Amino acid sequence: MENAIRQYERDWQSFNRIYQQIAVANNITFGELSMLLALESHKFYAANRQLVLDTGNNKLNGTKLTQQGIMVSKTNPADKRSRVITLTAAGQKWAVKILNAIHTVERCAMVLRSNN
């Protein structure tokens, strides 16, 4: 069990290094990349509180993405005290390219792992 935990930790660290490289290559922060991954799991529409829970980041900062016209933050119609985060149509196209790169790396890693 201890070996499995160590291997999981090494794999997790390796993926984080790859995610960081993808973020840098796309001129975004690791936090912004985490936000894109979380938004993807919610079909690019989520309350800010949900994104905080999904990313483990207690302060999400999408200001740069908002200024670039990639992301929109507006009042949550279901709860006026919170915000809803969505991606614009152009933002979704942009995000899908980045997320596809991540998913390709993940699929390759799973294939390599299953062959060992």
Image: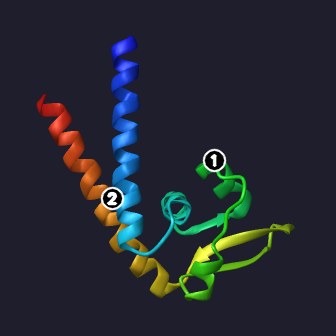
The answer to which image quadrant residue 26 occupies is bottom left
| Rendered location of residue 66, percent (x, y) | 62, 82
Residue 14: mark in rendering: none
Extreme residue in the top direction: 1
Looking at the rendered image, the quarter that the C terminus falls into is top left
> The residue under label 1 is which amino acid type?
Gly
Secondary structure found at label 1: loop
Left or right, residue 111 beside residue 34: left
Secondary structure found at label 2: helix
Q: Residue at x 40, y 80 (%)?
A: 93
Left or right, residue 28 beside residue 73: left
Viewer-proximal residue among 72 and 17: 17
Q: Is residue 88 above or below residue 101?
A: below
Task: Measure how far apart labels 1 and 2 are at the Cα level.
Answer: 19 Å
Viewer-proximal residue among 73 and 23: 23
| Rendered location of residue 33, percent (x, y) | 48, 63
Left or right, residue 53 beside residue 1: right
Neighbour class for label 1 at 10 Å: few (<14), some, many (≥20)? few
Number of marks in the rendered image: 2
The answer to which image quadrant residue 32 occupies is bottom right
| Rendered location of residue 105, percent (x, y) | 26, 53
| Rendered location of residue 113, percent (x, y) | 20, 34
- Look at mark 2 in the image and give the residue it sits on: 102
Q: Are marks 1 and 2 in contact (CB under 8 Å)?
A: no
Q: Residue at x 38, y 22 (%)?
A: 6
Looking at the rendered image, the quarter that the N terminus falls into is top left
Neighbour class for label 2 at 10 Å: few (<14), some, many (≥20)? some
Viewer-proximal residue among 115 and 7: 7
- Look at mark 1 in the image and give the residue it sits on: 56
> The residue under label 2 is which amino acid type?
Ile
Q: What color scheme is it?
A: rainbow
